[in-house]
Image (cartoon, grey):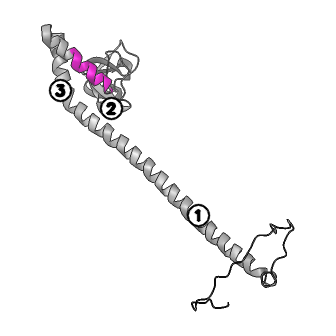
Amino acid sequence: MPPRENGHEEPVIRDNRKIDPETGQVREAPADEQEAPAEAPQAQNGELAAQLAERTADLQRLQAEYTNYRRRVERDRVVVREQAVAGALTELLPVLDDIGRARDHGELTGGFAKVAESLEAVLTKLGLSPFGQKGDPFDPTVHEALMHSYSTEVTEPTAIEVLQLGYRMGDRVLRPARVAVAEPEDATPASDDDDN
């Protein structure tokens, strides 16, 4: 570069446009660019492609981990909520038993009856449902047998008396129904007379 009057070199301006603006013709690439080996860009492209594939795999792995984390947190949040609601409902079961006994004895009147109905409605809204009816087939997964007898009036083990209602929240049994169970009389154990 030729030095300028003040001693500094003049800037070099290169026109890298592929089409000559004056003639409109395609320009030839300079000789120094034509001599550059074609393998170098391909090697760089291969290396860049490998880095891109590695970064993409890392991103996909992180995305999958994050998605799994979100699902696990949401599932845990639902479980914790259900456990908290079940714990609170379990503590209220004796109150419901007292309300049921008051209703059976005709003592549930006036304002107390409205409060009891409101409480039962709220607990039903939270998912609490009573179960256990006289005449239900005995199911040891949802019934607790407190008394046992034999009867000719039943054809299978049956709850003949409900001593205390059972409660469930969804599919989860909070308290089994406490019942008196009767079995068919022909299922009685063999007596000692058969041994003679």
Whether residue 32 is visible here, answered yes or no, is yes
Crowd around label 1: few <14 · some 14–19 · many ≥20 (10 Å): few
Q: Nearer the viewer, residue 3 or 89?
A: 3
Magenta residues span 117-127
Q: Main secondary structure of the magenta part?
A: helix
Residue sitting at x 60%, y 68%: 54
Q: Hey, what amino acid is under mark 2?
A: Val
Q: Quadrant location of residue 188?
A: top left
The residue wearing badge 2 is 173
Residue sitting at x 73%, y 81%: 40
Q: Residue 130 at x, y = what percent?
A: 30, 22
Dot 2 and dot 1 residues touching (CB under 8 Å): no
Q: Would residue 123 be counted in the magenta stretch?
A: yes
The residue wearing badge 3 is 94
Q: Would residue 190 be counted in the magenta stretch?
A: no
* Badge 3 or badge 1: first in the primary sequence: 1
Reply above or below: 101 against 195: above
For label 2, the SS is strand
Q: CA distance from mark 3 to mark 2?
A: 15 Å
Q: Hey, what amino acid is under mark 3?
A: Pro
Reply above or below: 153 against 13: above
For label 1, the SS is helix
